[in-house]
């Protein structure tokens, strides 16, 4: 009887986890389509799916769009935004600047997991190389023609929102796995960070 209860409880937790990961995916897709700004859309999707609140982190990601400043030669906003979210939850704290090694190295490990997922899917974490992978070419987003071409090729109808959706689900999964590993419960994410 007890084993059945434990199995049912484990299945319920797994279902909740899957639902949260799927919600992060869907929100990431919708937010990038509607609002643009891959880093902020990734952060908003993960925050909203998991119940995290921190407007300063969201604001701090403003400049990370399209590899940073729309230059496309930096890291993908889905990747940089993801590292920001994961480090917010499990990263070194300022009041423990000279310590906090466990959480500091946890944030490194989570960033590495996200990196591996990007490499597995896109062979890169660099914005313009992801563009080359999903569009077949690189765009100059600072140029009016380049930006128009980017949109005509499906930037915000399927392409970049797909990357943001995928990144958002990966980030949610990595965070939830760490929560499970530490036996913290998902409400841990809702506390002030």
Image: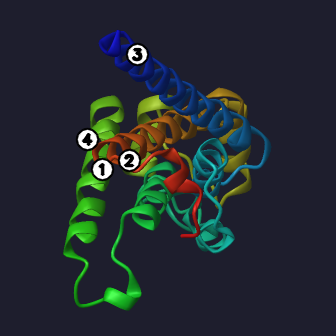
**Rendering coords of residue 117 (x, y %):** 32, 37
Q: Are marks 4 and 1 in contact (CB under 8 Å)?
A: no
Sequence-wise first label, 4 or 1: 4
Q: Quadrant of residue 89?
A: bottom left
> Could you tell me how far apart the alpha carbons at marks 3 and 4 are, in whole angstroms?
36 Å
Closer to the observer: label 2 or label 4? Answer: 2
Residue closer to the observer: 86 or 71: 86
In the picture, measured across the screen, residue 66 lies left or right of residue 121, that is right
Sequence-wise first label, 3 or 4: 3
Mark 4: secondary structure? helix
The residue labelled by disc 4 is: 116
> Could you tell me how far apart the alpha carbons at marks 4 and 1 are, in whole angstroms?
22 Å
The residue labelled by disc 2 is: 179
50 in relation to 109, above or below = above
Residue closer to the observer: 12 or 86: 12
Residue closer to the observer: 116 or 143: 116
Q: Are marks 2 and 1 in contact (CB under 8 Å)?
A: yes
Mark 2: secondary structure? helix
The residue labelled by disc 3 is: 5
Q: Are marks 1 and 3 in contact (CB under 8 Å)?
A: no
């Amino acid at each position: 009887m007890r084993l059945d209860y434990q199995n049912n409880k484990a299945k319920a937790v797994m279902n909740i986890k899957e639902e949260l990961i799927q919600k992060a995916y869907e929100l990431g897709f919708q937010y990038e389509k509607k609002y643009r700004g891959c880093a902020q859309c990734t952060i908003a999707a993960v925050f909203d799916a998991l119940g995290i609140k921190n407007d300063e982190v969201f604001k701090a990601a403003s400049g990370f769009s399209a590899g940073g400043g729309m230059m496309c030669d930096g890291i993908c906003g889905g990747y940089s935004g993801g590292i920001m979210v994961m480090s917010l939850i499990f990263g070194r704290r300022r009041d423990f600047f000279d310590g906090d090694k466990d959480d500091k190295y946890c944030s490194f490990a989570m960033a590495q997991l996200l990196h591996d997922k990007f490499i597995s899917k896109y062979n890169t974490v660099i914005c313009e190389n992801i563009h080359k992978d999903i569009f077949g070419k690189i765009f100059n987003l600072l140029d009016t023609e380049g930006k128009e071409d980017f949109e005509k090729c499906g930037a915000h109808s399927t392409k970049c929102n797909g990357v943001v959706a995928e990144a958002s689900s990966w980030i949610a999964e990595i965070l939830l796995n760490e929560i499970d590993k530490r036996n913290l419960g998902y409400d841990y994410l809702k506390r002030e960070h």
